[in-house]
Amino acid sequence: MDLELVLAMQERLELCSDLAELARVAPWVETLATRYQIPAKTTFAINLCLEEALSNVVRHGYKNIPGHPILVDFRSSPGELVFIIEDHAPHFQPADMGIPLPQSLEEMTPGGLGIPLMRRFANRVEWEPLTSGNRITLVFFLRPHSDSSNSQ
């Protein structure tokens, strides 16, 4: 495989543990969406999941203390998009991954809905502790284009 092609299939966003830094995520995702022809519905899901995961890292992992690194790696392969978030925050134990989202606003209570929300919008959500920090992996499947008339 051509080295340039391999490098083009992986991208990285380096953030600092400050909620204002999260404003850089959506433009980065939009650039990826254009470059990799990511459908709008998938782009929305990616933005939603990244915002939830990254704001949790800043607010809960780093306790809103600025200056700590957060890395977001993007990898594209046929049929899927993978976002890997790594931090150096204390380990956390994810809530039960099977908690359902509330069906109405009346059922909602603050907190604890981040992982169920991500699981609803991503095809796969994985967490693993690192020697110093955490890794969250978000995977989004792409459906093959049914219209091949644009192929050259």
Image (spheres, rainbow, N blue to C red):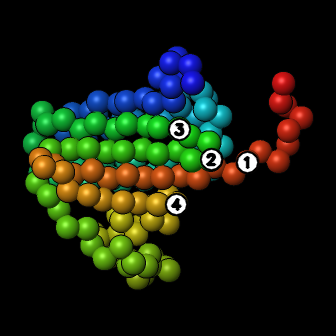
Q: Could you classify mark 1 by the number of other residues whose Cα lies within 10 Å: few (under 14), some (14-19), or many (20 or more)?
A: few
CA gap, disc 3 and disc 2: 8 Å
Amino acid tagged 2: Gly
Instruction: Please tell me the numbered disc located at residue 79.
Output: 2
- Which residue is pictured at 43% across the width and 29% down the height? 11
Disc with the residue nearer the chain's start (3 vs 1):
3
CA gap, disc 4 and disc 2: 12 Å
* Circle 4 or circle 2, nearest the eye: 2
Disc with the residue nearer the chain's start (4 vs 2):
2
Instruction: Please tell me the numbered disc located at residue 99.
Output: none
Q: Where is residue 8 drawn, in percent x and y? A: 51, 23
Instruction: Please tell me the numbered disc located at residue 144.
Output: 1
Amino acid tagged 1: Pro
- Which residue is pictured at 42% across the width and 52% down the height? 138
Disc with the residue nearer the chain's start (4 vs 1):
4
Asked whether 112 or 86 is in front, the reply is 86
- Which residue is pictured at 35% across the width and 63% down the height? 114
CA gap, disc 4 and disc 1: 15 Å
Marks 4/2 in contact by CB < 8 Å: the verdict is no
CA gap, disc 3 and disc 1: 14 Å
CA gap, disc 1 and disc 2: 7 Å
Q: Could you classify mark 4 by the number of other residues whose Cα lies within 10 Å: few (under 14), some (14-19), or many (20 or more)?
A: some
Asked whether 10 or 119 is in front, the reply is 10
Instruction: Please tell me the numbered disc located at residue 123.
Output: 4
Marks 1/2 in contact by CB < 8 Å: the verdict is yes
Q: How many marks?
A: 4
According to the picture, the residue beneath numbered tag 3 turns out to be: 76
Question: In which image quadrant can residue 52 be found?
Answer: bottom left
